[in-house]
Amino acid sequence: MGLIWDDDEDIAMELAEAHPDVDPLDISFPTMLKWITELKGWEDDPQSANEGKLENIQMKWHEEFRGR
């Protein structure tokens, strides 16, 4: 099964692997949305994104980024 918006931790991990040198707090939501929808296995509707979902993914990604 592919990635959907509810897979916020998995999405964050995939973004951290795909963009290891990027601090997620330094990118815009439109850029992050583009990167999410380009992830291998992405299956959800990009139009279903909202600020809350993107913020949640961004924070989980930031935790991963800081832990490296």
Image (cartoon, rainbow, N blue to C red):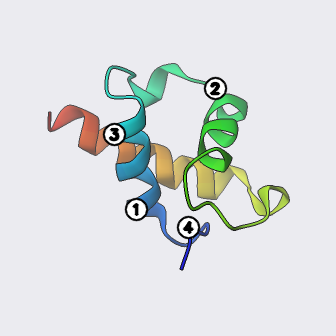
Looking at marks 3 and 1 on the same chain, the residue that comes earlier in the sequence is marked by: 1
Q: Which residue does the numbered mark 1 point to in the structure image?
A: 10
Query: Residue 3: which numbered mark, if any?
Result: 4
Query: Residue 28: which numbered mark, if any?
Result: 2
Residue type pointed to by label 2: Ser
Which residue is depicted at the point 32% across and 28% down? Answer: 20
Please state the horizontal and vertical placement of residue 51, each as a whole percent of the image: 69, 49
Looking at marks 4 and 3 on the same chain, the residue that comes earlier in the sequence is marked by: 4
Query: Residue 17: which numbered mark, if any?
Result: 3
Vertical order, 44 against 67 (above or below): below
- Name, please, the residue furthest toward the front: 40
Q: Find the distance from the CA under tag 3 to the CA under tag 1.
A: 11 Å
Which residue is depicted at the point 66% across and 34% down? Answer: 29
Vertical order, 30 against 43 (above or below): above
Q: Residues within 10 Å of mark 2 (few under 14, many from 20)?
A: few
Q: Secondary structure at mark 2?
A: loop
